[in-house]
Amino acid sequence: MIGFIRLAVFGFIGLTVLYFLVSIYSRSTRREELEKAWGAEQGPGDRDGFIAAGMAEYEKGLRKKLIWLVYVIPTLAVIAAVYLLNFA
Amino acid sequence: MRYVKWTFIAIIALLLFSFFHYTLPQTDIARVVGTENRRIDFGENSFFWASPDVGTAIDKNRDVFFIQTFRADGKPMVYRNEDTGWGWPPYFKLDSSNLQAEAQNMVSNSDNPRWAAITHYGWRNEFLTIFPNAISIRSVEGPDVGFFPWFNVMFFIVLGGVLLMLWRMWAQFRERTIDPALESIGDTIDEVDAKADNLWARVTRWLGSWKGKPRR
């Protein structure tokens, strides 16, 4: 039991670090895309407003929610490994 | 310096290769000739043993299951059969007792051989008395069955993808955060420099005001 708790706690810490790194990266690439889109079109509106609106949309969008897969996929992989290697 | 650099790179490459060769699964074709368990006092080789069965106590010594086999080439190979539990390497093996029963069920002699594919990780080394840890066992047709290492190929593809992703993340961070910060530090230094120049010009002008007017 202690081994399982240790795996869960350290796994959770590691995945949380990864979650934040991926969030920062994803947000950064989205902002860069918006900056480039505005740079190519010189519009609509002013640059800061356009980027702020785009980022507000990103915060509500599907792409940000998909980052939760950072937690889901390793957990499913462990469950699948336990099943396949012991009970299949 | 070139020799030092290449020696260093070679050692790193060797360590990485050994690590993956030890940890990733491999499949042997072998004929089980017997199973046993014996008590092991872990010594210098304790690094190469896994963990006690999940839920049982940890002590300095314990009984370990062994599976004795002969490979298709006629050479003996002995596997240990230990739980890895929730620890390293991440095989999450909890069923060593069941595996021992399966291995026992496959015992055969050389006159009437029953061939089995034994998936395992680890090394057999006589100098350290270490054994590969059997993960699973199943019947196969004959000694010449081959397996394509699907899992290992997938593993390295995924590992490559993860490394590429980490590298991309680092490149993005450098481009968007570190470089602008360095640039702004550079700008600040330029500003300070300009201010210093400005101050120096004022000081020399002030000093110049003490000079006498040029004589006519």
Image (cartoon, coloured by chain):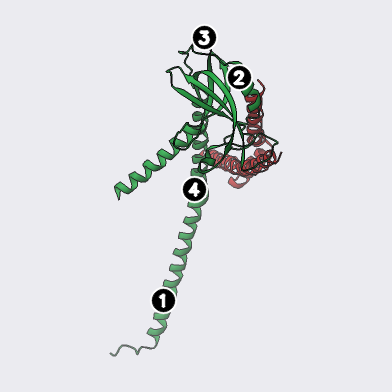
Chain colours: A red, B green
Q: Earlier in the sequence, mark 4 or mark 3?
A: 3
As drawn, which residue projects farthest toward the left? Answer: B216
Whether residue A42 is visible, yes or no, is no
Q: Are marks 2 and 1 on the same chain?
A: yes
Answer few, some or many: residues within 10 Å of disc 2's Cα (few below 14, many 20 plus, some between 14 and 19). Answer: some
| Above or below for B144 versus B153 | above
- Which residue position is annotated with label 3? B112
Q: Amino acid at mark 4?
A: Arg
Mark 4 or 2, closer to the camera: 2
Circle 1 sits in a helix, a strand or a loop, which is it? helix
Q: Is disc 3 in contact with disc 2, using a CB cutoff of under 8 Å?
A: no
Q: Amino acid at mark 3?
A: Asn
Circle 2 sits in a helix, a strand or a loop, which is it? helix
In percent of width and height, residue B109 lies at: 52, 13
Whether residue B72 is visible, yes or no, is yes
Q: Chain letter of disc 2? A: B
- Which residue position is annotated with label 1? B200
Q: Amino acid at mark 1?
A: Trp
Mark 3 or 1, closer to the camera: 3
Circle 3 sits in a helix, a strand or a loop, which is it? loop
The numbered dot on residue B174 is 4
Circle 4 sits in a helix, a strand or a loop, which is it? helix
- Which residue position is annotated with label 2? B104
Q: Earlier in the sequence, mark 4 or mark 1?
A: 4
Quarter occupied by the N terminus of chain A: top right
